[in-house]
Image (cartoon, helix red, strand yellow):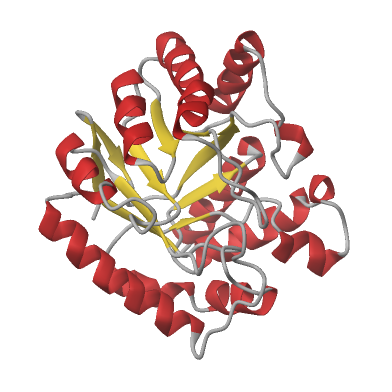
Amino acid sequence: MNSINCKGKLINVSQPMVMGIINATPDSFYEGHLKLNTEQLIQFAGQMINSGAGILDIGGISTKPGSNPISIEEEIDRVLPAIESIHSVFPEMVLSIDTHSSKVAKEAVKAGASIINDISAGNLDEQMIETVASLQVPYIIMHMQGVPSEMQKNPVYKEVVKEVLDFFILKIESCSKAGIKDLIIDPGFGFGKTIEHNFQLLKELSALTILNKPILVGLSRKSIIYKTLNVAAIEALNGTTVLNTIALLNGARILRVHDVKEATEAVRLFNAYKKAP
């Protein structure tokens, strides 16, 4: 798959790109991304775009380990103003809605989003896959063991890479049968996986290229980095860049990050490295 159709705008995914994270939540695990007012939000989005983001991913629910769900109404109240504001100022920018609710997804696409990013791959809302198919937008499906409130209590796999691969084989088939044309896969680093599971997935990420779908990785400032280095999330930027670079070498095509400038630099250096004779 070389491109995805985002409501008529074709995005080239044959080359690596950066997705900037915008958390419209009061409890982001990373303190640098606490809830912003409208003016700050627009400024923040503009900085990400100027730094090289190709997609902005807007979410209204915290999915950090141990997080609790909120109502659909509250989620809509958080994300719709953000999407509408950014879309009005940057109408050519591709916006993604980070949600596992089909109702939120539908409202977000109406407001200006053109990608749906679902951590549950349709497992938390039986209407989601049908909804995405009807909206005809790209769908990011992520692997997660359990649910955010309990996913890190005791994640167990016999062979983590094989189980993630098998999950995607089945999900891709069901999504394709439903009529979804553009799929992106996310192995779900930190979602129902130990640090060892995460490193194993990263080391063997290239195994997922057999699926012929763009691979998105979300490693930014996660526990795989800050716990391994024994630092706080706010000190995990350098570690994020290191693991993002490894992910690029192993087949990642979209880096989902808090820090767009540094990720864009990693992509530029990776591209130069690949072009070297």
Farthest bottom residue in view: 158
Residue 6's place in the image compared with 47, above or below, is below
| Image point (36%, 27%), residue name | 108
Residue 178's place in the image compared with 23, above or below, is below
Which one is in front, 26 or 225?
26
| Image point (57%, 18%), residue name | 46
| Image point (52%, 52%), residue name | 272
From this viewpoint, is residue 55 visible? Answer: no
| Image point (72%, 30%), residue name | 34
What is the number of callouts on the image?
0
User: Is 93 on the left or on the right of 160, as rendered?
Assistant: left
From this viewpoint, is residue 196 visible? Answer: yes
Q: Quadrant of residue 92?
A: top left
Of the 4 image quadrants, the one containing the N terminus is bottom left
**Image location (x, y in percent) of residue 172:** 24, 64
Q: Quadrant of residue 113?
A: top left
User: Is 206 on the left or on the right of 179, as rendered?
Assistant: right
Residue 68's place in the image compared with 164, above or below, is above
**Image location (x, y in percent) of residue 257:** 59, 44
User: Is 37 on the left or on the right of 103, as rendered?
Assistant: right
Q: Quadrant of residue 142?
A: bottom left
Which one is in front, 208 or 50?
208
**Image location (x, y in percent) of residue 162:** 41, 84
